[in-house]
Image (cartoon, rainbow, N blue to C red):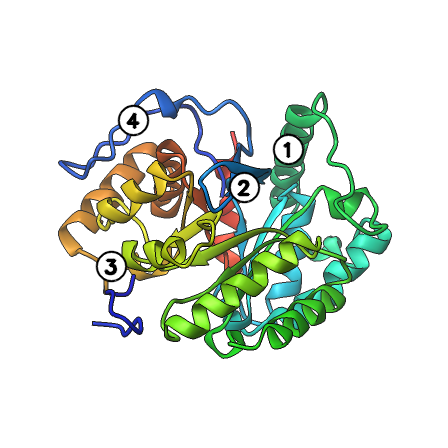
């Protein structure tokens, strides 16, 4: 998360069973939020009016499949397996560099309800686990009211998915028409008439550009091209800047969060103002770049529970009530994810 200045300069899946996570004094103890009833829990994105009253309420699956650092070669396989496993929320961004590869696949899925993929080359054990996850997810939601089409004529395949997209700094603009053109191009590319959540990926473009872009996104929300507007990596000063300019706060603020990097003041401000917290960027918690002693303790806990460190972190996020977007950028990571669906 960037430090604040006037121009913003810089200074999946659940685990088997229910258990408490406690990593020394890392404030990661389980509480009443530990009881997670569904295989894929939902929360809500609340879009407020400028006066703080709630203008809209959009259901969002708390666990997303992120295409961050996913190679163009691997992305189609990752999407095919995620769809087979019943994943409903997908995290995408211009800066990820793979939207041109995955967008046509989403188009096919929205038209046919599936994408063409040769599952015969996959391991039977992996497919069985994915099918089990899908069955549990379908069972959990079978009695719930199906999402009605937000706009346009997409089928149920589109309505069952939640698409998140992050605009790059280069796509931020003081020209509302340019922002509008960017969104229209995205919806066309993905074969959908709307995106569920569009966020500014960074506040590091300067006050005028980020505010103008944010205002343009709010307008497109009113027109039905976007269901919710969010931000990423915003500090308290950036959030207050939005309010000071007479605009409602975002539905979500995605941060680089972990038990080692909790961003207390930002999280507190967001909770007090109905802004959902999202967390990602687990890759920075590697043994090479992360806090070594605490990372080793996390590894010991994962070994004792028979799960991965990433699964522990996903569970920590859910217990905190955060949305999270873990990634599976390699074959081995994707194949281990279904083992945590219980």
Name the residue at 50% across, 72% down.
Answer: 168
- Write down the quadrant of residue 143 in the picture: top right
Give the Cα distance between marks 4 and 1.
27 Å
Among numbered discs 4 and 1, the one appearing first in the sequence: 4
Q: Residues within 10 Å of mark 3 (few under 14, many from 20)?
A: some
Among numbered discs 2 and 4, the one appearing first in the sequence: 4
Residue designated by label 4: 30
User: Is label 4 in a helix, a strand or a loop?
Assistant: loop
Q: Are discs 3 and 1 less than 8 Å apart at CB?
A: no
x, y percentage for residue 286? 29, 59
Residue designated by label 2: 338
Q: Are discs 4 and 3 less than 8 Å apart at CB?
A: no
Q: Residues within 10 Å of mark 2 (few under 14, many from 20)?
A: many
Name the residue at 46% across, 25% down.
Answer: 36
x, y percentage for residue 41? 53, 32
x, y percentage for residue 83? 68, 48
Q: Are discs 4 and 1 less than 8 Å apart at CB?
A: no
User: Is label 1 in a helix, a strand or a loop?
Assistant: helix
Give the Cα distance between marks 3 and 2.
23 Å
Give the Cα distance between marks 2 and 4.
23 Å
Which mark is in front, 2 or 4?
Answer: 4
Q: Which mark is residue 132?
A: 1
Lateral position of residue 193 relative to residue 249, left or right: right
Name the residue at 70% across, 72% down.
Answer: 185
Which mark is in front, 4 or 1?
Answer: 4
Residue designated by label 3: 287
């Amino acid at each position: 998360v960037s430090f604040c200045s006037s121009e913003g300069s810089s200074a999946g899946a659940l685990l088997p069973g229910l258990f408490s996570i406690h990593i020394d004094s890392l404030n990661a103890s389980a509480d009443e939020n530990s009881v997670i009833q569904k295989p894929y829990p939902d929360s809500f994105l609340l879009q407020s009016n400028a006066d703080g009253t709630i203008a809209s309420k959009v259901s969002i699956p708390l666990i997303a499949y992120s295409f961050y650092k996913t190679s163009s070669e691997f992305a189609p396989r990752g999407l095919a397996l995620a769809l087979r496993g019943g994943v409903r929320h997908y995290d995408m961004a211009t800066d990820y560099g793979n939207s041109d590869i995955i967008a046509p696949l989403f188009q096919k899925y929205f038209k046919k309800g599936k994408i063409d993929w040769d599952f015969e080359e996959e391991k039977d054990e992996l497919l069985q686990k994915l099918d089990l996850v899908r069955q549990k997810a379908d069972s959990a939601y079978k009695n719930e009211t199906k999402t009605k089409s937000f706009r346009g004529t997409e089928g149920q395949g589109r309505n069952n998915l939640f698409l998140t997209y992050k605009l790059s700094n280069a796509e931020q603009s003081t020209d509302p028409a340019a922002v509008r053109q960017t969104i229209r191009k995205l919806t066309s590319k993905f074969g959908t008439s709307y995106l569920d959540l569009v966020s500014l990926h960074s506040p590091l473009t300067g006050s005028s550009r980020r505010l103008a872009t944010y205002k343009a996104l709010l307008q497109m929300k009113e027109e039905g091209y976007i269901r919710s507007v969010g931000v990423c990596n915003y500090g308290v000063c950036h959030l207050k800047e939005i309010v000071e300019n007479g605009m409602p706060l975002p539905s979500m603020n995605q941060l680089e969060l972990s038990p080692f990097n909790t961003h207390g003041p930002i999280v507190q401000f967001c909770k007090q103002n109905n802004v959902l917290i999202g967390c990602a960027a687990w890759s920075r918690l590697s043994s090479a770049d992360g806090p070594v002693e605490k990372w080793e303790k996390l590894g010991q806990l994962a070994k004792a529970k028979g799960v991965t460190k990433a699964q522990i972190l996903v569970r920590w996020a859910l217990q905190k009530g955060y949305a999270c977007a873990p990634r599976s950028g390699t074959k081995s990571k994707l194949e281990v994810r279904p083992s945590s669906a219980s």
